[in-house]
Amino acid sequence: MALLQIAEPGMSAAPHEHRLAVGIDLGTTNSLVATVRHSVAEVIADDQNRPLLPSIVRYLADGRVELGYEAQQHQATDPRNTIVSVKRFMGRGVKDVEHVENLPYDFVDAPGMLQIKTVAGVKSPVEVSSEILKTLRARAEAALGGELVGAVVTVPAYFDDAQRQATRDAAKLAGINVLRLMNEPTAAALAYGLDNAAEGVYAVYDLGGGTFDISILRLTKGVFEVLSTGGDSALGGDDFDHRLYCWALEQANLSLLGPEDQRLLTVKARTAKETLSTRAGTTMQARLSQGQWVNLSISADSFAGMTQHLVAKTLDATRRALRDAGLKPADLKGVVMVGGATRMPHVRKAVRDLFECEPLTDIDPDKVVAIGAALQANLLAGNRIAGDDWLLLDVIPLSLGLETMGGLVEKIIPRNSTIPVARAQEFTTFRDGQSAMAIHVVQGERELVRDCRSLARFELRGIPPMVAGAARIRVTFQVDADGLLSVSARETTSGVEASVTVKPSYGLGDDDIARMLRESMDAAGTDVAARMLREQQVDAERLLAATEAALRADGDLLSEAERARIDVCVAALDAQARGDDPEAIRRNVAALAHATDELAARRMDRSIRAALAGRKVEEISVK
Amino acid sequence: MNNQPDHFALFGLPPRFELDSDALDAAYKLVQAKVHPDRFAAGSAAERRIAMQWAARANEAMRTLRSPTRRAAYLCELNGTTIDAESNTSMPPAFLTQQLEWREALDEARHAPTPVPLATLAEQAAQARRSLHAGLADALDRDGDFALAATLVRQLMFVDKLCDEIAAAAAVDAWEPAPPRAA
């Protein structure tokens, strides 16, 4: 898939060195890690050749942590300390979690994001997820034989800012350099598009264990352009299990089970659901802790009937995404099926009926997201092969706005805006002499603040006294390529400024993450100081190499004085880079980065001009 | 970010209302291929930040130029004429009368017990939009009459909104699910 061949400033530093990078699919039910080896993207299996890692974490009283299949064996006997489907809790409070009464955990309702009490102490979903990520990172580093440069971690396209931040924090806590948070359906589209050199408009229908996404993409000459996205970040295979579980309770005349029996019956429900994907009927048998026997039989048809409302919800979201893209089902060239839950025949049938075409299922729906993420990680790490190149243009799933008078939402960035995006809006004061303004950032489609998700609150203070309506407060929203928001506010007549990176109110600041990281390294017996020094040294080497390459290519963009200033910083950093003072290295890295800021801007400018000039020549020569 | 090229210059396109949409799309993708943060994921912090700013500018430029209404408003503003859609609401009486009639028709269709075909209304609104586009092309590209163009942009904003509402109402007929029944 040939697109544009460009030697890039930051990437030409070490052209022949293959940098170890992976794609991680952090799933509700299972997680995977994949990488590109010898130009082929493949899932990295564990030492028993199992590709999946069940997303299950068990905490033991002695401080040990069990993961995956090992933890899975204890989920029915030790349900309180064995956390499954933790993804559903990322960036969520107790009140946000559905069926909370049926979950066996001892929740602590912390502000913004819940926590879980275990025998090993209170755990945040970020910490639980980081255990899964640590395991995958260790698996990849063992298989690839070296430290990772970074990873692309996937998130549901419909994840909001709080859920994305939580995922990014979990990766940071696992010691992973996140090259990009990538939307799961986009990753799947990449895997399919590159595999089949597809062109045209496609839908990706992604029904996972706990989340549903629908993305509509246009593929043209190596550009993957997301036109719209929709979904439900609390709808997935788990809900089908839960419906079957409730049916079983009803049929067997059971009520209020203990946590062990709850988990046991949920596991049986899941097994039955999976069996019904290939058989017309099955039985659910379980012996509960009080000795009662549950023995029920169920047909595929009645299972389809009792879960049809869940399928209908996915179709509603699909229709809305199509409408947002200005398309009808017939306009699409194909529908890619992603996620284990799309194995259910009645889900496939519903999708087939809506789009009137056979859904695409040739890549394993469990692996396709990790494969796409691995391809992207390889590209972002700089392992690009000439002629094999692509560009992803993704969108934000939910509108971002501010609270205004009367609890109403003023939308600043509408859903489906292509990211990165920056947009500003002016507001004014309500009272004479008003000296502060409360900025309340919300995300969602509804018109009332109380129906949207609150992301952050901050205050702009020190507004000079003016009559009501005279102040000009410019609020700027910026969403980066990871889909993460930062907001700043400025009174333009006086220049008073306030800004926040929207750290959703879940209470994990950068300091908390740093502390948790230190604690976990201490626990693992890692030499924290040595690791910090090594990280600073790597940073320094990278910046020196990048600066050298930039000066070689575009040194002519600098005046002599500017060049001299950079040379001084290079020499200073070079002298420190292999030393043992991490703070000195950090300071010199910052100084050199600052000195090369303007050069980076001018290079970008030159490269755009060159690209546009090149295009015109090309157009003329074609005609 | 001063001394930055305007949206047209960024894409190397002439500052005109009549615009080749394929050329716009091609130029947008070309610029994004150069500046997108994915190109600099392994670069320095400065490169990553600048890439984000440029990519956001390219997206904003694309959003502005892709929409005829926003493109026309932008051309007016580039030439020192503001649209002031909120404060300037004076419209020719004939235009307002026509708008009222269409809005009534749409309202009736929405509340009718059986679905009413909206194709005629949709076509009338689309026709109004086309003639406003033609008027804007003359005012902006031929006559340089930005005051007239600003008036036409304000009218176009009304018509756009009407078209959106007709489309939304039509979607309800065609394949929108029925509203959920009360439990």
Image (cartoon, coloured by chain):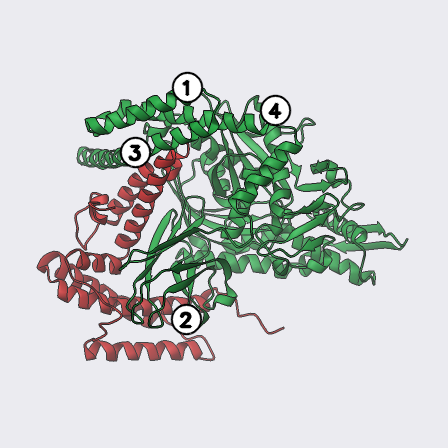
Mark 2 or mark 4, earlier in chain: 4
Q: Earlier in the sequence, mark 1 or mark 2?
A: 1
Same chain for labels 4 and 3? Say yes or no.
Answer: yes
Amino acid tagged 3: Ala
Lower position in the chain sequence, tag 1 or tag 4: 1
Dividing the picture into quadrants, the one containing residue A296 is: bottom right
**Which residue in the protein does label 4 denote?**
A142
Q: Secondary structure at mark 1?
A: loop
Find chain A in the image and tell me its colour: green
> Counting residues from the N terminus, which is met first, the one under dot 4 or under dot 3?
4
Using the rendered view, name the quadrant where residue A98 is placed: bottom right
Estimate how packed mark 4 is, as few (under 14), some (14 to 19) or many (20 or more) residues with alpha carbons within 10 Å: few
Q: Using the image as rendered, state which of residue A618 and residue A438 is in the foreground.
A: A438
Callouts 2 and 4 in the same chain:
yes
Alpha-carbon span between mark 2 and mark 3: 42 Å
* For residue B123, above or below residue A21: below
Q: Write down the residue under mark 2.
A: A405
First reached walking from the N terminus: tag 1 or tag 3: 1
Horizontal side, residue A126 vs residue A533: left or right: right
Whether labels 1 and 4 belong to a single chain: the reply is: yes
Residue type highlighted by circle 2: Met
**Chain corresponding to red in the figure:** B
Q: Please state the horizontal and vertical placement of residue B143, each as a whole percent of the image.
A: 9, 60
Callouts 1 and 3 in the same chain: yes
Same chain for labels 1 and 2? Say yes or no. Answer: yes
| Residue displayed at 14% across by 57% down | B79
